[in-house]
Image (tube, helix red, strand yellow):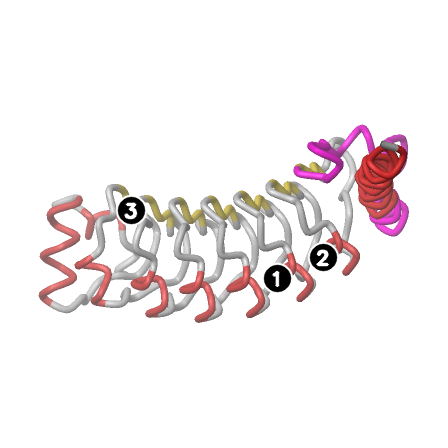
Amino acid sequence: MKMVGCFFSVIIMAVFSVGASDMAVVQTIIEKCGIEGVTAKDVATEEDGRIVTLDLKNRDISKDGISFLPPEIGQLTGLKVLIASGNIIDSIPAEIGQLTELTRLDLASNRIVAIPSTIGNCVNLTHLDLRHNRLSVLPPEIGNCKKLFLLQLWGNKLTEVTDAITKLPVLEEIYLKDNRLTTLPVGITKMKINYIDIIGNKMCDLSPKLDAWFKKKDKRYRETQKCW
């Protein structure tokens, strides 16, 4: 019986140790980012001793917010939701790829110019919000995110969209408004997309197949393009 008791004591101590470790990582992230007036418990949610949500969105619109995500973010391997919107982040660390349990990533309204190829390791991602950044391309590894359902990219500087998006079997909503696109991969016509927003692009001379597909979605789509 003593051995059994010791065994369970070790398990309990390990669980609390993991939780404490995760909270310590969050505190390190807060300090490195220079976030003032909050603690790890203010921005993180814990389940079964692991951090599962981390909310680093800018809470003071009179200030710029954080300028980067520290590589320590990759240590939170139980993370499912990461929010860092409304800041001035210009890059995403490669360590984002260590967050294989991540389902939602919200980095809207930042200054991000590129997405690391390691995003392809986030195989459980269902919602990706990159609105209002400075992206010109997407990495082809995005095609590895097979569970991606919602992709928000409006308000960027995209000049093309990788063919890899046609490898996303459950993608149903894609928002491409206000970019610099002149076309899309023709394979998109075979996808089960329920909603696509392309207002404010330059899709003025599409292939017959794409043109017909877009007309089924919105017969007046050309009127919303910058064809001047």
Q: Quadrant of residue 9?
A: top right
* x, y percent for residue 126: 45, 46
Going by the numbered disc 3, the residue's amino acid type is Ile
Q: Which residue is mark 1?
A: 97
Q: Earlier in the sequence, mark 3 or mark 2?
A: 2
Q: Earlier in the sequence, mark 2 or mark 1?
A: 2
Observer able to see residue 146: yes
Distance CA(mark 3)–CA(mark 2): 32 Å
Q: Are marks 3 and 1 in contact (CB under 8 Å)?
A: no
Kind of element beneath mark 3: strand
Q: How many residues crowd mark 3 within 10 Å: few (<14), some (14–19), many (20+)?
A: some
* x, y percent for residue 107: 60, 47
Q: Which residue is mark 3?
A: 196
- Residue at (83% x, 43% y) in the render: 14
Labelled disc at residue 119? none
Going by the numbered disc 2, the residue's amino acid type is Gly
The magenta-colored residue range is 26-52
Q: Nearer the viewer, residue 201 or 75?
A: 75
Q: How many residues crowd mark 1 within 10 Å: few (<14), some (14–19), many (20+)?
A: many
Going by the numbered disc 1, the residue's amino acid type is Gly
Q: Nearer the viewer, residue 87 or 52?
A: 52
Q: Is residue 225 above or below residue 127?
A: below
Numbered circles on residues, count:
3
Left or right side of 61 for 34: right
Labelled disc at residue 74? 2
Distance CA(mark 2)–CA(mark 1): 7 Å
Kind of element beneath mark 1: helix
Q: Are marks 2 and 1 in contact (CB under 8 Å)?
A: yes
* x, y percent for residue 163: 33, 70
- Residue at (63% x, 54% y) in the render: 99
The residue most toward the front is 1
Left or right side of 138 for 16: right
